[in-house]
Image: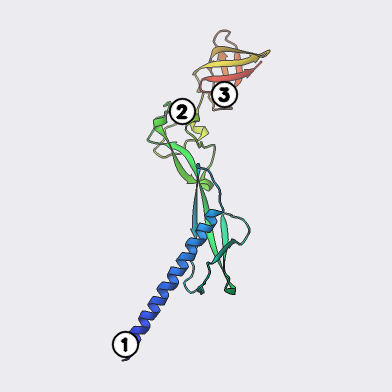
Amino acid sequence: MLIKIAASLVLFCFSLTAHTSELHSQLEKAAVDFVRSQITHDNRQKIDLTANQLDERVAIPDCLTPYRYSLANGEVRRNTSVLVTCDEQANWRLYIPVRKQVLLAVVVAASPIQEGAALTNAQLTTNFLPENRLRGSYFTELEPLVGAKLRRAMRKDQIITGRDICIVCKGDAVTISANAGGLNVTTQGTALSSGTIGDTIRARNNQSQRLVTGRVKAIGIIEVNL
């Protein structure tokens, strides 16, 4: 008889623990879903949300109406507390911490690339990486990099930054563009230094042999002010 009672108690406790554990998990998932519903982002981002695992010893009352969720701080932060309440239990409340991590689409090498290679679409891809781990002038789109040359070799999945490329490289044939009295004048030249979009570099006018300083406008084009 005592064995049967003990066995029944074990089964009851196991069932109660399983129910409690399931309820904790449901509230954790609901807290994550609620935070996600409060966030807007574009296709160049991914948002990872993780709820802190609740201590199974925390008492959670059964609620006849749906649990209510709100932002304890009024806004979504990197670490957000979600307040959970129940209409039938006015004195009960629970805070569930939810951690947010923003992932950005960043251009990386799709395969190993040799130094000096002119980049093509096939050599590039995007990976979603944690925003707080990104450093330097990284790229979020492929197009600005197509045709640029690598200053150093890249391994697969390595982030390509502004320091790794030159849109115009030293020794490249370039078109020198200048505005004079509302007219656009162009001539051919040779780059004497390297740079990316917006960088100031030196070039030699092939016709006059004059040295000029201009800003890199696009692949093979620099713009000078007269």
Label pair 3/2, CB-CB below 8 angstroms: no
**Disc 3 vs disc 2: which is toward the camera?**
2
Q: Earlier in the sequence, mark 1 or mark 3?
A: 1
Quick one: 155 or 10, which is closer to the camera? 10
* Residue picked out by circle 3: 216
| Residue 4 marker | 1
Across the whole image, how many numbered discs are drawn on residues? 3
Q: Residue at x 50, y 57 (%)?
A: 33
Res 79 quadrant in image? bottom right
Q: Residue furthest bottom?
A: 1
Q: Counting other residues with Cα less than 10 Å from the Cα at mark 2, is it few (<14), some (14-19), or many (20 or more)?
A: some
Where disc 1 sits, the SS reads: helix
Q: Residue at x 38, y 35 (%)?
A: 112
Which comes before the other along the chain, label 3 or label 2?
2
Q: Is residue 128 left or right of residue 180?
A: left
Look at the picture and state if 94 lies above or below 33: below
On residue 146, the disc is: 2
User: Which mark is in front, 1 or 2?
Assistant: 1
- Lower sequence index among marks 1 and 2: 1
Decide: marks 1, 3 in contact (CB < 8 A)?
Answer: no
Q: Position of residue 173 (x, y in %)?
A: 50, 16
Quadrant location of the C terminus? top right
Q: Amino acid at mark 1?
A: Lys
Q: Of helix, strand and loop, which one carries label 2? A: loop
Residue 36 point in image, percent of width and height: 52, 54
Q: Position of residue 199 (x, y in %)?
A: 58, 27
Quarter holding the N terminus is: bottom left
Please identify the quarter of the rendering in which residue 180 is found. top right
